[in-house]
Image (cartoon, rainbow, N blue to C red):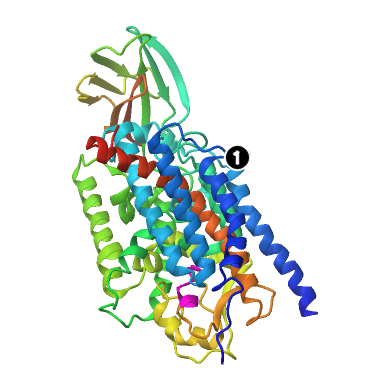
Amino acid sequence: MKKILAIPAYIWAVACFLLVPVTFIKNEAFAEQLAKLPFMKIHPKYKGGELNRSYEHNGLSVKINMPVFAALFGEGNKGFVQVAFSAPAQLPEQIEETIDYNFDNSPDFRVTINTLSGETILIPLDQTVKSLYASSKVKDDWVIRVNLKKD
Amino acid sequence: MNKPVYATEGSIWKSILLTFPMIMLIFIFISGGTPDLSTPEKSIAFLITFLFLTLLFFMILYTGKTDRYRAWGFIAMALFFALTFIVNLIKARGSMTFSQENLLACEIPFCHIVTTMIIIPIALTNSIIFPGSIIGGFASIASMLVIVIGVSFALGRGFCSWGCFYGGWDDGTSRILRKPKIKKINPVFRWVSFAVLLIIALISAMSLNPAYCDWFCPFKTVTEFEKVTSFTVLMKTIVFLSLFVGLVIILPVLTGKRIQCATFCPMGALLSLTNKINPFDVRIDKLNCSNCEKCVKACPTLSLSTNDVTAGRPSITCMKCGKCVDSCSRRAIHYHIKGTPVGKHYSWARNLFLYPAFLLLVLFLGGPMQSGIIMLINLIKTGSLIN
């Protein structure tokens, strides 16, 4: 009886031997399948949020994302909004834009970016806007994230 | 009582015969089927890697010593992985640091330890709290998760001694002193890693931030870390450097134990749980055991205590490195396949474990070792690792 019970155990062990190379050989195919699962997406805190609106202004394409107020449950009080600037050819040396991130027809902050040095000056024009969180060239765009606090 | 002997032990022909399938696998997996011998450097790198791995596996079979030869490959894996990772980072980014651009572009390579920090947020926010790429590029999240899941099912926490490209650091430093300065360590410390796992998982979930990566991971010292641009980042840098020096160098040297792996790695704790879902474990044949406790002293991960010897098995934290098996003069402690009798079929159980475990080592070591050797040849020829 013990010998009979040992047979599936050995088969299990052999299957595990096969599982190791299969995991690596078929890694790309398995990864593609795994990536299709609904939870396989980067959290907006890292991705920068969904695109909310984009427009052209002063020869620049301005993309404003949805504000992110990340929390484990619901929404937090503190968050950020990501804005990306891009140009058809090359980013200008100086970017100066006034942004209305919540589209209430009232400017929320003014930003001045020196794209050569990276120096970024943020002037809050609304009480929900707190400070600059990040400002960097990302591929061909210049991306800023601005800290927000809910009213 | 005579010490049981493995079928291949001391027999050159049997060892060669059982090494042969592994030779084929090593050839296929380190060359992709066709070795790239287009330059002398690549040919030398391939040849050295192939011979090194083949020799290790042969010696494991021929001498009956598992850990003694596993450790060579495992430590080489850690060193070559760090070398190639750092050199490639410097080639791509110009330094070991990652910048705000890399974070905003979600270009940070995903390592297996992050798995412990993303589970709760996945359940509650349906997304992954890590600035990496889901698929494509180097070390994508989906690709690494597939490896973690596959290897967990195959080897459980055996990953920590055969596949983890960090573990070789403290495995190596724990072997520096022949006789450790601190001899008595309470085995209760092996449960600390579970506390670390719990705390890290909760902090990461609450802050939606992979806290261990951000603050504590000592292995950032030998991979990549955030560019120091603020006081907070400076504090983080001091913390992970201190942990590397303390947990990966000083304490392993003094104790002869893999302190980082045994007490501070949250991934190790998570993989301990997967020890339950794979067929391989280590068992003690109590009829043959003389209670000398050499295995307890040998275990580098605090997984064996007097009580465990009495119970006939190491704790759930066992990393299947084989050091206890090597230390037993009566071979009372041995690799075992669940569902088969204890104290019998030593060779079958050992060989069935060794093939997938060693193959994992080959898969993780093959590429970095070849690249690393080419870099070292270039260093000798040109004086620079980066060419």
Above/below status of B60 relative to B207: below
Q: Decide whether residue B324 is among the magenta residues.
A: yes
Above/below status of B130 relative to B361: above
Q: Residues within 10 Å of mark 1 (few under 14, many from 20)?
A: few
Above/below status of B247 relative to A98: below
Q: Is residue B337 left or right of residue A43?
A: right
The image quarter in which residue A136 lies? top left
Residue ID at (41%, 32%): B39
| SS for dot 1 | loop
The answer to whether residue B349 of the structure is visible from this angle is: yes
Q: Chain of mark 1?
A: A
Q: Position of residue A81 (x, y in %)?
A: 37, 30
Q: Which residue is mark 1?
A: A38
Q: Position of residue B345 (x, y in %)?
A: 66, 76
Tag 1: residue type? Pro
Residue ID at (48%, 82%): B328
Q: Position of residue B257 (x, y in %)?
A: 35, 72
Looking at the figure, which quarter contains the N terminus of chain B? bottom right
Q: Which residues are magenta?
A: B319-326
Q: Position of residue B356 (x, y in %)?
A: 58, 58
